[in-house]
Image (cartoon, grey):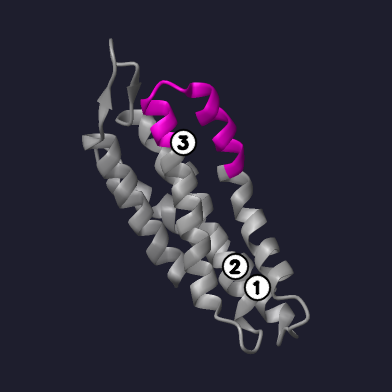
Amino acid sequence: MWGLVLAVLLDVLTFLVARYGPSGGDAMVWSFRGNGALVVPFGVGPAVLAGGWTALVLHGRTGVRWLWWSVAAVLIGVAVVLASVAATVLGRLDAADRLTYLILAWAAIAPILALAARRGVRQAGPVRHVVAAVVFVVGFVGGFLVAEQFLAPGS
């Protein structure tokens, strides 16, 4: 359910950035309009996956604030995306390129760090949480693709 809702919100944000997003620099060096809006699904998308997977990894553990950890994972991922955007706007494309790898890796790093920080706390129903993680990804990606069909130009 949350995967679908977040996917639709992400797609709406992508649509808005593609249509009305900023651009600038001498001779339009950078632009987030059109294809530049792909920073939203390929930047914020991994941050959302990091938060969802972190929540699912920690959800069945007693005494763990899984919601706080998952929101923190999303916010850290979004901060890295914003740092990459700032590097692009400032003309530091080499730094923006390096941050791209961190953005994509954060989806895997965040739940691993959360597990390492909360090791020793027993997980209840691990198979159920693994299945939920797969369903979250399928719902998130599928929801984004379906929402894209409704917001695509010419529909």
Give me the residue at 40% from left, 54% from top: 146
Label of residue 57 in the image: 1
Give me the residue at 75% from left, 85% from top: 122
Q: CA distance from mark 1 to mark 2?
A: 5 Å
Does residue 142 show up?
no
Pointer 1 or 3: first along the chain: 1
Label 2: state its secondary structure.
Answer: helix
Camera-near label (1 vs 3) is 3
User: What's under tag 3, amino acid-wise?
Assistant: Ser
Foreground of the two, 94 or 141? 94
Q: Residues within 10 Å of mark 2 (few under 14, many from 20)?
A: many
x and y percentages locating residue 95 in the rendered image: 53, 28
In the rendered view, tell whether residue 142 sits above or below residue 152: below
User: What's under tag 1, amino acid-wise?
Assistant: Val
Residues at discs 1 and 2 in contact (Cβ within 8 Å): yes
- The magenta-colored residue range is 84-102
Residues at discs 1 and 3 in contact (Cβ within 8 Å): no
- The residue identified by callout 2 is 54
- Left or right: where does residue 50 sit relative to residue 25? right
- The residue identified by callout 3 is 84
- Quadrant for the N terminus, please: bottom left
Does residue 72 show up?
yes
Name the residue furthest left: 20
Foreground of the two, 130 or 31? 31
Give me the residue at 40% from left, 43% from top: 40
User: What's under tag 2, amino acid-wise?
Assistant: Thr
- Left or right: where does residue 17 sit relative to residue 126? left
Label 3: state its secondary structure.
Answer: helix
